[in-house]
Image (cartoon, rainbow, N blue to C red):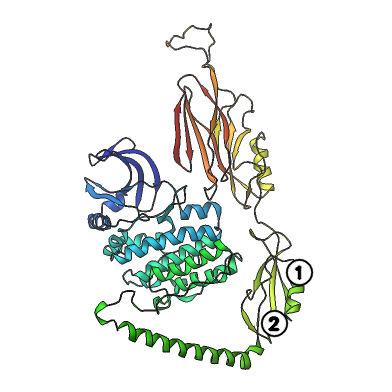
Amino acid sequence: MIGQIVNFRYEVLEKVGDGTLFAVYKSRDKALNRLVALKLLRREVASNTAFAEAVKAGYQEASSLSHPGITSVVNADISGSDCFVATEFVHGTNVKERVRRTGSMAVPLALDIVIPVLEALDYAHSVGKLHGDLRASDIIVSPDGHVNVTDFGLSRALMSCPDVAAAYGMRSAHYQAPEIAEGQSPSVKSDLYSVGIILYEMLTGSLPFDGPSAVAVAVKKARTIPEAPRTLNAAIPKSLSDIVMKAIEPDPDARYNCALDMLRDLRAISESLRVGRPVRPAQAAYAPGESRYVDEEVRAPDSLKKSFLLYLGVFVAVVAIFLLGTIFFLGGKGRAEVPDVLGMTWDEASAVVERGKFTLVNDGRGYSETYEAGKICSQTPQGGEMVARNNMEIKVKISDGSSRVAVPDLVGLAEADATQLAGQEGFLVGEVTYANSDSVPVNSVISQSPRGGYRRPPGSSINIVLSNGPKPTGDTPTEPGTTSSTGTSDVAPAARQFEIEADIPSDAGASENVKIIVDDVNGQTVAHDEDHQPGEKVRVTVTGYGRPVRIRVFRDGRLVKDTKQ
Protein backbone atom coordinates (compact mmCIF):
# COMPACT_ATOMS: atom_id res chain seq x y z
CA MET A 1 0.00 0.00 0.00
CA ILE A 2 2.92 2.39 0.64
CA GLY A 3 3.04 5.02 -2.13
CA GLN A 4 -0.42 4.22 -3.49
CA ILE A 5 -3.12 6.86 -3.99
CA VAL A 6 -6.52 5.89 -2.55
CA ASN A 7 -9.66 7.38 -4.09
CA PHE A 8 -7.48 9.75 -6.20
CA ARG A 9 -6.84 11.77 -3.03
CA TYR A 10 -4.98 10.02 -0.20
CA GLU A 11 -1.28 9.24 -0.66
CA VAL A 12 -0.28 6.37 1.66
CA LEU A 13 2.98 7.19 3.48
CA GLU A 14 3.48 4.47 6.09
CA LYS A 15 1.61 1.86 8.11
CA VAL A 16 1.03 2.93 11.71
CA GLY A 17 -1.34 0.32 13.12
CA ASP A 18 -3.20 -2.94 12.70
CA GLY A 19 -6.62 -3.55 14.25
CA THR A 20 -9.15 -6.34 14.12
CA LEU A 21 -11.24 -4.63 11.44
CA PHE A 22 -8.97 -1.91 10.03
CA ALA A 23 -5.39 -1.42 8.88
CA VAL A 24 -4.31 2.16 9.61
CA TYR A 25 -1.95 4.21 7.44
CA LYS A 26 -0.44 7.64 7.85
CA SER A 27 -1.43 9.38 4.63
CA ARG A 28 -1.42 12.79 2.99
CA ASP A 29 -4.70 14.33 1.89
CA LYS A 30 -3.62 15.80 -1.46
CA ALA A 31 -6.81 17.85 -1.72
CA LEU A 32 -6.32 19.66 1.62
CA ASN A 33 -2.53 19.16 1.88
CA ARG A 34 -2.58 17.76 5.41
CA LEU A 35 -1.84 14.49 7.17
CA VAL A 36 -4.71 12.09 7.86
CA ALA A 37 -5.11 8.63 9.34
CA LEU A 38 -6.46 6.42 6.57
CA LYS A 39 -8.30 3.37 7.95
CA LEU A 40 -8.85 0.65 5.37
CA LEU A 41 -11.43 -2.00 6.20
CA ARG A 42 -9.85 -5.43 5.93
CA ARG A 43 -10.72 -7.24 2.71
CA GLU A 44 -12.35 -10.19 4.48
CA VAL A 45 -14.96 -7.88 6.02
CA ALA A 46 -15.02 -5.29 3.22
CA SER A 47 -16.31 -8.06 0.94
CA ASN A 48 -19.51 -7.98 3.04
CA THR A 49 -21.12 -5.12 1.11
CA ALA A 50 -23.85 -4.58 3.70
CA PHE A 51 -21.26 -4.09 6.44
CA ALA A 52 -19.08 -1.85 4.24
CA GLU A 53 -22.08 0.38 3.50
CA ALA A 54 -22.97 0.45 7.20
CA VAL A 55 -19.39 1.48 8.09
CA LYS A 56 -19.55 4.27 5.53
CA ALA A 57 -22.92 5.50 6.85
CA GLY A 58 -21.88 5.28 10.51
CA TYR A 59 -18.71 7.32 10.09
CA GLN A 60 -20.40 9.85 7.81
CA GLU A 61 -22.94 10.43 10.56
CA ALA A 62 -20.14 10.81 13.14
CA SER A 63 -18.44 13.45 10.96
CA SER A 64 -20.86 16.03 12.39
CA LEU A 65 -19.18 15.76 15.82
CA SER A 66 -16.92 18.71 16.57
CA HIS A 67 -15.07 18.58 19.89
CA PRO A 68 -11.34 18.90 20.76
CA GLY A 69 -11.45 15.51 22.50
CA ILE A 70 -13.03 13.63 19.57
CA THR A 71 -11.02 12.61 16.50
CA SER A 72 -12.79 14.31 13.59
CA VAL A 73 -13.88 12.25 10.58
CA VAL A 74 -12.72 13.83 7.28
CA ASN A 75 -14.30 11.37 4.87
CA ALA A 76 -15.80 7.88 4.67
CA ASP A 77 -16.47 6.17 1.38
CA ILE A 78 -16.16 3.06 -0.77
CA SER A 79 -13.69 3.10 -3.66
CA GLY A 80 -13.66 -0.04 -5.78
CA SER A 81 -13.07 -2.94 -3.40
CA ASP A 82 -11.81 -0.65 -0.62
CA CYS A 83 -13.92 0.77 2.18
CA PHE A 84 -11.98 3.55 3.88
CA VAL A 85 -12.34 6.14 6.62
CA ALA A 86 -10.12 9.23 6.72
CA THR A 87 -9.76 11.00 10.07
CA GLU A 88 -7.49 13.68 11.47
CA PHE A 89 -4.04 12.29 12.20
CA VAL A 90 -3.43 12.11 15.96
CA HIS A 91 0.09 11.54 17.31
CA GLY A 92 0.22 9.43 20.44
CA THR A 93 -0.19 6.04 22.10
CA ASN A 94 -3.52 4.41 22.90
CA VAL A 95 -4.38 3.56 26.50
CA LYS A 96 -4.39 -0.21 25.87
CA GLU A 97 -0.80 -0.07 24.63
CA ARG A 98 0.32 2.18 27.51
CA VAL A 99 -1.10 -0.26 30.08
CA ARG A 100 0.48 -3.19 28.24
CA ARG A 101 3.88 -1.53 28.34
CA THR A 102 3.93 0.01 31.82
CA GLY A 103 1.17 -1.66 33.86
CA SER A 104 -1.10 0.32 36.16
CA MET A 105 -1.03 4.11 36.01
CA ALA A 106 -0.67 6.55 38.88
CA VAL A 107 -4.04 7.89 40.06
CA PRO A 108 -3.45 11.51 38.87
CA LEU A 109 -2.44 10.33 35.39
CA ALA A 110 -5.48 8.03 35.09
CA LEU A 111 -7.75 10.94 36.10
CA ASP A 112 -6.05 13.26 33.60
CA ILE A 113 -6.99 10.77 30.88
CA VAL A 114 -10.50 9.70 31.91
CA ILE A 115 -11.82 13.23 32.64
CA PRO A 116 -11.30 14.44 29.01
CA VAL A 117 -12.89 11.17 27.80
CA LEU A 118 -16.02 11.90 29.85
CA GLU A 119 -16.03 15.51 28.62
CA ALA A 120 -16.03 14.22 25.04
CA LEU A 121 -18.83 11.74 25.80
CA ASP A 122 -20.88 14.40 27.59
CA TYR A 123 -20.71 16.56 24.45
CA ALA A 124 -21.55 13.64 22.14
CA HIS A 125 -24.49 12.54 24.30
CA SER A 126 -25.80 16.12 24.42
CA VAL A 127 -26.10 16.14 20.61
CA GLY A 128 -27.68 12.68 20.51
CA LYS A 129 -24.62 10.64 19.51
CA LEU A 130 -23.41 7.50 21.33
CA HIS A 131 -20.06 5.81 20.98
CA GLY A 132 -21.43 2.32 21.64
CA ASP A 133 -18.10 0.50 21.20
CA LEU A 134 -15.63 2.33 23.47
CA ARG A 135 -12.43 0.40 24.23
CA ALA A 136 -9.06 1.30 25.77
CA SER A 137 -7.53 1.22 22.29
CA ASP A 138 -9.97 3.97 21.18
CA ILE A 139 -8.38 6.50 23.57
CA ILE A 140 -5.17 8.09 22.26
CA VAL A 141 -2.90 10.18 24.48
CA SER A 142 -0.43 12.47 22.69
CA PRO A 143 3.09 13.15 24.01
CA ASP A 144 1.88 16.52 25.38
CA GLY A 145 -1.00 14.84 27.27
CA HIS A 146 -3.88 15.70 24.93
CA VAL A 147 -6.58 12.99 24.93
CA ASN A 148 -8.59 11.98 21.85
CA VAL A 149 -11.50 9.53 21.57
CA THR A 150 -11.71 7.75 18.21
CA ASP A 151 -14.10 5.49 16.27
CA PHE A 152 -17.43 7.18 16.87
CA GLY A 153 -19.68 5.60 14.22
CA LEU A 154 -18.45 2.01 14.19
CA SER A 155 -21.02 0.66 16.66
CA ARG A 156 -23.85 1.54 14.28
CA ALA A 157 -22.30 -0.72 11.62
CA LEU A 158 -21.78 -3.58 14.08
CA MET A 159 -25.36 -3.33 15.37
CA SER A 160 -26.73 -3.48 11.82
CA CYS A 161 -24.64 -6.58 10.95
CA PRO A 162 -24.93 -9.06 13.87
CA ASP A 163 -23.02 -11.73 11.94
CA VAL A 164 -19.92 -9.53 11.75
CA ALA A 165 -20.31 -8.43 15.39
CA ALA A 166 -20.53 -12.08 16.49
CA ALA A 167 -17.49 -13.11 14.43
CA TYR A 168 -15.38 -10.39 16.06
CA GLY A 169 -17.05 -10.49 19.48
CA MET A 170 -13.82 -10.69 21.50
CA ARG A 171 -12.59 -7.26 20.28
CA SER A 172 -15.18 -5.51 22.48
CA ALA A 173 -16.26 -8.23 24.94
CA HIS A 174 -14.23 -6.91 27.90
CA TYR A 175 -15.58 -3.35 27.63
CA GLN A 176 -19.17 -4.06 26.57
CA ALA A 177 -22.01 -3.57 29.06
CA PRO A 178 -23.89 -6.79 29.98
CA GLU A 179 -27.12 -5.57 28.40
CA ILE A 180 -25.37 -5.07 25.03
CA ALA A 181 -24.23 -8.71 25.08
CA GLU A 182 -27.89 -9.62 25.66
CA GLY A 183 -28.94 -7.85 22.45
CA GLN A 184 -29.98 -4.41 23.70
CA SER A 185 -28.98 -1.23 21.87
CA PRO A 186 -26.16 1.00 23.17
CA SER A 187 -27.14 3.76 25.58
CA VAL A 188 -25.61 6.56 27.63
CA LYS A 189 -25.24 4.14 30.55
CA SER A 190 -23.54 1.48 28.42
CA ASP A 191 -20.97 4.11 27.31
CA LEU A 192 -20.33 4.95 30.99
CA TYR A 193 -19.94 1.23 31.77
CA SER A 194 -17.16 1.08 29.16
CA VAL A 195 -15.49 4.12 30.75
CA GLY A 196 -15.62 2.34 34.12
CA ILE A 197 -13.91 -0.76 32.70
CA ILE A 198 -11.19 1.37 31.06
CA LEU A 199 -10.60 3.30 34.30
CA TYR A 200 -10.39 -0.03 36.22
CA GLU A 201 -7.78 -1.23 33.71
CA MET A 202 -5.75 1.98 33.95
CA LEU A 203 -5.71 1.93 37.76
CA THR A 204 -4.98 -1.78 38.26
CA GLY A 205 -3.25 -2.88 35.05
CA SER A 206 -5.83 -5.66 34.59
CA LEU A 207 -9.41 -6.15 33.40
CA PRO A 208 -12.18 -6.89 35.92
CA PHE A 209 -13.60 -9.70 33.76
CA ASP A 210 -11.61 -12.03 31.53
CA GLY A 211 -12.17 -15.32 29.73
CA PRO A 212 -11.24 -17.34 26.64
CA SER A 213 -14.33 -16.27 24.66
CA ALA A 214 -16.89 -13.48 24.45
CA VAL A 215 -19.51 -15.80 25.95
CA ALA A 216 -17.25 -16.68 28.91
CA VAL A 217 -16.63 -12.96 29.60
CA ALA A 218 -20.38 -12.22 29.40
CA VAL A 219 -21.15 -15.04 31.85
CA LYS A 220 -18.59 -13.68 34.34
CA LYS A 221 -20.14 -10.22 34.10
CA ALA A 222 -23.56 -11.68 34.88
CA ARG A 223 -22.50 -14.00 37.72
CA THR A 224 -19.48 -12.50 39.48
CA ILE A 225 -18.58 -9.30 41.29
CA PRO A 226 -15.02 -8.20 40.50
CA GLU A 227 -12.52 -7.20 43.16
CA ALA A 228 -12.66 -3.49 43.93
CA PRO A 229 -9.71 -1.64 42.36
CA ARG A 230 -8.45 -0.60 45.82
CA THR A 231 -7.92 -4.24 46.82
CA LEU A 232 -5.55 -4.66 43.83
CA ASN A 233 -3.80 -1.30 44.20
CA ALA A 234 -3.76 0.18 47.69
CA ALA A 235 -2.72 3.59 46.30
CA ILE A 236 -6.23 4.10 44.90
CA PRO A 237 -8.46 6.27 47.15
CA LYS A 238 -11.55 4.43 48.38
CA SER A 239 -13.83 7.12 46.92
CA LEU A 240 -12.30 6.59 43.45
CA SER A 241 -12.58 2.80 43.81
CA ASP A 242 -16.28 3.24 44.67
CA ILE A 243 -16.85 5.39 41.58
CA VAL A 244 -15.36 2.69 39.35
CA MET A 245 -17.53 -0.02 40.95
CA LYS A 246 -20.64 2.13 40.47
CA ALA A 247 -19.81 2.68 36.79
CA ILE A 248 -19.50 -1.09 36.13
CA GLU A 249 -22.64 -2.17 37.98
CA PRO A 250 -24.39 -4.93 35.96
CA ASP A 251 -27.76 -3.21 36.55
CA PRO A 252 -27.94 -0.04 34.38
CA ASP A 253 -30.22 1.63 36.94
CA ALA A 254 -27.44 1.42 39.56
CA ARG A 255 -24.91 3.25 37.34
CA TYR A 256 -24.42 6.96 36.79
CA ASN A 257 -27.30 8.58 34.94
CA CYS A 258 -25.12 10.69 32.67
CA ALA A 259 -21.48 11.50 31.91
CA LEU A 260 -21.71 14.81 33.77
CA ASP A 261 -22.60 13.02 37.05
CA MET A 262 -19.49 10.84 36.85
CA LEU A 263 -17.42 13.79 35.64
CA ARG A 264 -18.33 15.87 38.71
CA ASP A 265 -17.20 13.15 41.12
CA LEU A 266 -13.92 12.54 39.30
CA ARG A 267 -13.15 16.26 39.06
CA ALA A 268 -13.70 16.59 42.81
CA ILE A 269 -11.20 13.78 43.49
CA SER A 270 -8.68 15.27 41.05
CA GLU A 271 -8.95 18.67 42.74
CA SER A 272 -8.61 17.10 46.20
CA LEU A 273 -5.42 15.32 45.14
CA ARG A 274 -4.07 18.51 43.57
CA VAL A 275 -4.44 20.64 46.72
CA GLY A 276 -3.87 17.84 49.25
CA ARG A 277 -7.33 17.77 50.79
CA PRO A 278 -9.01 14.54 51.98
CA VAL A 279 -10.43 12.77 48.93
CA ARG A 280 -14.22 12.92 48.85
CA PRO A 281 -16.43 12.81 45.73
CA ALA A 282 -18.54 15.87 44.95
CA GLN A 283 -22.25 15.72 45.61
CA ALA A 284 -24.46 15.90 42.55
CA ALA A 285 -26.13 19.26 42.09
CA TYR A 286 -29.46 17.58 41.35
CA ALA A 287 -31.28 14.47 42.48
CA PRO A 288 -30.66 11.14 40.69
CA GLY A 289 -32.86 10.90 37.62
CA GLU A 290 -33.71 14.62 37.65
CA SER A 291 -33.32 16.43 34.36
CA ARG A 292 -30.60 19.05 33.99
CA TYR A 293 -32.98 21.14 31.93
CA VAL A 294 -35.77 23.25 33.50
CA ASP A 295 -38.92 24.33 31.68
CA GLU A 296 -38.98 28.14 31.99
CA GLU A 297 -42.81 28.30 31.79
CA VAL A 298 -43.48 26.21 34.91
CA ARG A 299 -40.97 27.85 37.28
CA ALA A 300 -42.47 29.13 40.53
CA PRO A 301 -42.12 32.83 41.45
CA ASP A 302 -38.79 33.68 43.11
CA SER A 303 -40.35 34.74 46.44
CA LEU A 304 -42.28 31.48 46.74
CA LYS A 305 -39.18 29.46 45.88
CA LYS A 306 -37.09 31.27 48.49
CA SER A 307 -39.69 30.67 51.21
CA PHE A 308 -39.97 27.03 50.27
CA LEU A 309 -36.19 26.58 50.30
CA LEU A 310 -35.92 28.30 53.69
CA TYR A 311 -38.51 26.01 55.30
CA LEU A 312 -37.00 22.99 53.59
CA GLY A 313 -33.55 23.88 54.94
CA VAL A 314 -34.81 24.23 58.50
CA PHE A 315 -36.66 20.91 58.24
CA VAL A 316 -33.58 19.09 56.90
CA ALA A 317 -31.38 20.57 59.66
CA VAL A 318 -33.77 19.43 62.41
CA VAL A 319 -34.01 15.92 60.95
CA ALA A 320 -30.21 15.72 60.58
CA ILE A 321 -29.61 16.76 64.19
CA PHE A 322 -32.17 14.22 65.40
CA LEU A 323 -30.61 11.42 63.36
CA LEU A 324 -27.06 12.27 64.43
CA GLY A 325 -28.13 12.29 68.08
CA THR A 326 -29.85 8.94 67.67
CA ILE A 327 -26.78 7.42 66.02
CA PHE A 328 -24.48 8.76 68.72
CA PHE A 329 -26.54 7.60 71.70
CA LEU A 330 -27.84 4.31 70.27
CA GLY A 331 -25.23 3.07 67.84
CA GLY A 332 -22.06 5.13 68.12
CA LYS A 333 -20.71 3.12 71.01
CA GLY A 334 -21.05 -0.10 69.03
CA ARG A 335 -18.90 0.92 66.02
CA ALA A 336 -15.38 2.20 65.48
CA GLU A 337 -13.45 3.78 62.63
CA VAL A 338 -10.62 1.67 61.17
CA PRO A 339 -7.23 3.45 61.23
CA ASP A 340 -5.26 3.67 57.97
CA VAL A 341 -1.95 1.78 58.44
CA LEU A 342 -0.84 1.55 54.80
CA GLY A 343 2.85 2.42 54.38
CA MET A 344 3.68 1.80 58.05
CA THR A 345 6.02 -0.84 59.46
CA TRP A 346 4.52 -3.61 61.62
CA ASP A 347 5.69 -1.89 64.82
CA GLU A 348 4.32 1.50 63.76
CA ALA A 349 0.97 -0.01 62.82
CA SER A 350 0.80 -2.01 66.07
CA ALA A 351 1.14 1.17 68.11
CA VAL A 352 -1.60 2.90 66.09
CA VAL A 353 -4.15 0.06 66.26
CA GLU A 354 -3.58 -0.56 69.96
CA ARG A 355 -4.66 3.00 70.73
CA GLY A 356 -7.97 2.24 69.01
CA LYS A 357 -8.20 -1.19 70.67
CA PHE A 358 -7.89 -2.98 67.32
CA THR A 359 -5.93 -6.20 66.70
CA LEU A 360 -3.36 -6.46 63.88
CA VAL A 361 -3.31 -9.80 62.01
CA ASN A 362 -0.47 -10.79 59.65
CA ASP A 363 -2.10 -11.93 56.38
CA GLY A 364 1.17 -12.82 54.63
CA ARG A 365 3.43 -10.98 52.21
CA GLY A 366 3.07 -9.64 48.69
CA TYR A 367 4.79 -7.56 46.01
CA SER A 368 4.02 -3.85 45.75
CA GLU A 369 5.05 -1.18 43.25
CA THR A 370 3.89 1.50 45.74
CA TYR A 371 5.23 0.47 49.15
CA GLU A 372 8.84 -0.50 49.85
CA ALA A 373 9.85 -3.81 51.40
CA GLY A 374 8.88 -4.14 55.07
CA LYS A 375 5.97 -1.67 54.85
CA ILE A 376 2.28 -2.61 54.98
CA CYS A 377 0.95 -2.70 51.39
CA SER A 378 -2.60 -3.98 51.94
CA GLN A 379 -5.16 -3.90 54.75
CA THR A 380 -8.66 -5.30 55.27
CA PRO A 381 -10.90 -3.55 56.18
CA GLN A 382 -9.72 -0.30 54.59
CA GLY A 383 -8.79 2.77 56.60
CA GLY A 384 -11.76 5.00 57.33
CA GLU A 385 -14.36 2.21 57.29
CA MET A 386 -16.69 1.78 60.27
CA VAL A 387 -16.77 -1.70 61.84
CA ALA A 388 -18.57 -3.32 64.77
CA ARG A 389 -16.61 -3.31 68.02
CA ASN A 390 -17.04 -7.06 68.31
CA ASN A 391 -14.96 -7.47 65.11
CA MET A 392 -11.83 -5.34 65.59
CA GLU A 393 -9.30 -7.29 63.51
CA ILE A 394 -7.27 -5.63 60.76
CA LYS A 395 -5.61 -8.05 58.34
CA VAL A 396 -2.46 -6.67 56.68
CA LYS A 397 0.06 -7.83 54.10
CA ILE A 398 3.74 -6.87 54.32
CA SER A 399 5.45 -5.70 51.12
CA ASP A 400 8.32 -7.67 49.64
CA GLY A 401 9.09 -4.64 47.47
CA SER A 402 8.72 -4.33 43.73
CA SER A 403 8.02 -7.43 41.67
CA ARG A 404 10.32 -6.01 38.99
CA VAL A 405 13.95 -7.10 38.87
CA ALA A 406 17.04 -5.79 37.10
CA VAL A 407 17.54 -6.97 33.50
CA PRO A 408 20.90 -8.78 33.16
CA ASP A 409 23.58 -7.24 30.91
CA LEU A 410 24.04 -9.63 27.97
CA VAL A 411 26.20 -7.44 25.71
CA GLY A 412 29.40 -9.21 24.66
CA LEU A 413 28.21 -12.69 25.68
CA ALA A 414 27.96 -15.58 23.22
CA GLU A 415 24.38 -16.45 22.27
CA ALA A 416 24.32 -19.64 24.39
CA ASP A 417 25.74 -17.83 27.44
CA ALA A 418 23.31 -14.93 27.02
CA THR A 419 20.36 -17.30 26.82
CA GLN A 420 21.54 -19.17 29.93
CA LEU A 421 22.10 -15.98 31.97
CA ALA A 422 18.71 -14.56 30.95
CA GLY A 423 17.02 -17.77 32.09
CA GLN A 424 18.87 -17.80 35.41
CA GLU A 425 17.65 -14.27 36.12
CA GLY A 426 14.05 -15.19 35.24
CA PHE A 427 13.90 -13.63 31.75
CA LEU A 428 13.41 -14.99 28.23
CA VAL A 429 15.34 -14.24 25.06
CA GLY A 430 12.81 -12.79 22.62
CA GLU A 431 13.47 -11.55 19.08
CA VAL A 432 16.96 -12.28 17.73
CA THR A 433 18.32 -10.15 14.85
CA TYR A 434 21.76 -9.89 13.26
CA ALA A 435 24.11 -7.05 12.33
CA ASN A 436 27.73 -6.63 11.34
CA SER A 437 30.32 -5.58 13.92
CA ASP A 438 34.05 -5.00 13.75
CA SER A 439 34.50 -5.36 17.50
CA VAL A 440 32.01 -8.03 18.68
CA PRO A 441 32.76 -11.69 17.83
CA VAL A 442 30.40 -13.66 15.58
CA ASN A 443 27.23 -14.89 17.37
CA SER A 444 27.86 -12.65 20.37
CA VAL A 445 25.47 -9.98 21.59
CA ILE A 446 25.99 -6.48 20.14
CA SER A 447 23.04 -4.84 21.90
CA GLN A 448 19.87 -5.70 23.79
CA SER A 449 16.45 -4.24 24.51
CA PRO A 450 15.70 -3.46 27.29
CA ARG A 451 19.21 -2.57 28.36
CA GLY A 452 20.95 -4.20 31.30
CA GLY A 453 19.99 -2.66 34.63
CA TYR A 454 16.43 -1.68 33.63
CA ARG A 455 13.80 -3.15 35.96
CA ARG A 456 11.21 -5.37 34.34
CA PRO A 457 8.78 -8.10 35.60
CA PRO A 458 10.29 -11.61 35.66
CA GLY A 459 9.28 -13.58 32.58
CA SER A 460 9.70 -10.56 30.27
CA SER A 461 11.51 -10.97 26.96
CA ILE A 462 14.90 -9.47 26.10
CA ASN A 463 15.43 -8.80 22.39
CA ILE A 464 19.06 -9.18 21.29
CA VAL A 465 21.16 -8.29 18.23
CA LEU A 466 23.89 -10.85 17.40
CA SER A 467 27.08 -10.15 15.50
CA ASN A 468 27.67 -11.39 11.95
CA GLY A 469 31.28 -10.26 12.24
CA PRO A 470 32.87 -7.46 10.17
CA LYS A 471 31.20 -6.26 6.98
CA PRO A 472 32.52 -8.07 3.89
CA THR A 473 34.95 -6.03 1.78
CA GLY A 474 34.84 -8.14 -1.41
CA ASP A 475 36.16 -11.57 -2.36
CA THR A 476 39.02 -10.49 -4.64
CA PRO A 477 41.20 -7.61 -3.45
CA THR A 478 42.44 -5.21 -6.13
CA GLU A 479 44.66 -2.16 -6.23
CA PRO A 480 43.08 0.94 -4.63
CA GLY A 481 40.99 2.87 -7.09
CA THR A 482 40.64 0.01 -9.60
CA THR A 483 37.36 -1.59 -10.59
CA SER A 484 36.29 -5.19 -10.91
CA SER A 485 35.10 -6.89 -14.08
CA THR A 486 31.58 -5.87 -13.21
CA GLY A 487 32.53 -2.21 -13.36
CA THR A 488 32.11 -1.59 -9.64
CA SER A 489 34.82 -0.46 -7.24
CA ASP A 490 36.36 -3.16 -5.05
CA VAL A 491 37.49 -0.63 -2.45
CA ALA A 492 35.48 -1.03 0.77
CA PRO A 493 33.21 1.99 1.34
CA ALA A 494 34.47 4.35 4.02
CA ALA A 495 32.89 4.04 7.45
CA ARG A 496 31.48 7.23 8.97
CA GLN A 497 30.12 7.69 12.48
CA PHE A 498 27.25 9.95 13.49
CA GLU A 499 26.10 11.09 16.94
CA ILE A 500 22.29 10.82 17.09
CA GLU A 501 20.13 12.50 19.72
CA ALA A 502 16.62 11.21 20.55
CA ASP A 503 15.64 12.65 23.95
CA ILE A 504 12.44 11.48 25.64
CA PRO A 505 10.26 14.38 26.95
CA SER A 506 10.01 14.47 30.75
CA ASP A 507 6.20 14.63 30.47
CA ALA A 508 5.94 11.55 28.24
CA GLY A 509 4.07 9.69 31.00
CA ALA A 510 5.57 6.30 30.12
CA SER A 511 8.68 4.72 28.66
CA GLU A 512 9.05 5.02 24.89
CA ASN A 513 10.78 2.78 22.39
CA VAL A 514 13.53 4.45 20.35
CA LYS A 515 14.50 2.75 17.09
CA ILE A 516 17.26 4.07 14.83
CA ILE A 517 17.51 2.63 11.29
CA VAL A 518 20.55 3.25 9.07
CA ASP A 519 20.34 2.88 5.26
CA ASP A 520 23.70 2.86 3.47
CA VAL A 521 25.51 1.07 0.64
CA ASN A 522 25.34 -2.19 2.64
CA GLY A 523 21.56 -2.07 3.00
CA GLN A 524 19.37 -1.39 6.03
CA THR A 525 20.58 -1.90 9.62
CA VAL A 526 18.78 -1.43 12.94
CA ALA A 527 21.40 0.48 14.91
CA HIS A 528 19.38 0.93 18.10
CA ASP A 529 16.10 -0.51 19.41
CA GLU A 530 15.52 0.06 23.15
CA ASP A 531 12.97 1.45 25.61
CA HIS A 532 13.85 4.67 27.44
CA GLN A 533 12.28 6.41 30.43
CA PRO A 534 10.62 9.89 30.42
CA GLY A 535 13.24 12.64 30.64
CA GLU A 536 16.08 10.35 29.53
CA LYS A 537 18.67 11.92 27.21
CA VAL A 538 19.41 9.39 24.48
CA ARG A 539 22.78 9.69 22.71
CA VAL A 540 23.67 6.93 20.22
CA THR A 541 26.71 6.67 17.94
CA VAL A 542 25.83 4.92 14.67
CA THR A 543 28.03 3.87 11.77
CA GLY A 544 27.20 4.28 8.09
CA TYR A 545 29.16 3.20 5.00
CA GLY A 546 29.52 5.14 1.76
CA ARG A 547 27.35 8.03 0.63
CA PRO A 548 24.64 8.93 1.16
CA VAL A 549 23.74 7.54 4.59
CA ARG A 550 20.08 7.89 5.55
CA ILE A 551 19.31 7.84 9.30
CA ARG A 552 15.75 7.57 10.57
CA VAL A 553 14.73 7.89 14.24
CA PHE A 554 11.41 6.48 15.47
CA ARG A 555 9.80 7.00 18.90
CA ASP A 556 7.08 4.45 19.66
CA GLY A 557 6.79 3.77 15.92
CA ARG A 558 6.50 7.47 14.97
CA LEU A 559 9.12 8.90 12.62
CA VAL A 560 10.63 11.91 14.42
CA LYS A 561 13.84 12.46 12.44
CA ASP A 562 14.90 11.61 8.88
CA THR A 563 18.29 12.85 7.65
CA LYS A 564 20.73 12.09 4.84
CA GLN A 565 24.44 12.53 5.48
110 sits left or right of 460 in the view:
left
Q: Point out residue 239 in the picture as x, y percentages from the top left corner.
A: 54, 71
- Mark 1 and mark 2 lie on one chain; the one further toward the N terminus is 1
293 sits left or right of 408 in the view:
left
Instruction: Using the image, determine if residue 19 lies above or below residue 393.
Output: above
Along the line of sight, the residue nearer the viewer: 238 or 151: 238
Q: Point out residue 499 in the picture as x, y percentages from the top left corner.
A: 55, 28
Q: Secondary structure at mark 2?
A: loop
Q: Point out residue 165 in the picture as x, y percentages from the top left corner.
A: 33, 62
Could you tell me which residue is drawn at 59 percent across and 50 percent down? 460
Residue 170 visible to an observer of this rendering: no
Instruction: Using the image, determine if residue 364 lies above or below residue 494.
Output: below
Could you tell me which residue is drawn at 56 percent across and 58 percent down? 106
Question: Which of labels 1 and 2 is toward the front?
Answer: 1
Q: Secondary structure at mark 1?
A: helix
Query: Seen from this angle, which residue lies furthest front?
Result: 303
Along the line of sight, the residue nearer the viewer: 329 or 375: 329
Instruction: Using the image, determine if residue 169 lies above or below residue 542.
Output: below
500 sits left or right of 132 in the view:
right
Q: Point out residue 143 in the picture as x, y percentages from the top left corner.
A: 47, 47
Q: Confirm or deny contact between disc 1 and disc 2 (CB under 8 A).
A: no
Label 2 crowd (10 A; few <14 / some 14-19 / many >=20): some
Query: Looking at numbered disc 2 in the image, what kind of residue is underneath it?
Result: Met
Query: Looking at numbered disc 1 in the image, what kind of residue is underneath it?
Result: Glu
Q: Would you name the residue on which mark 2 appears?
A: 392
Label 1 crowd (10 A; few <14 / some 14-19 / many >=20): few
Residue 394 visible to an observer of this rendering: yes
Q: Quarter holding the N terminus?
A: top left
Q: Would you name the residue on which mark 1 appears?
A: 348
Along the line of sight, the residue nearer the viewer: 352 or 434: 352
Q: CA distance from mark 1 to mark 2?
A: 18 Å
The tag on residue 339 is none
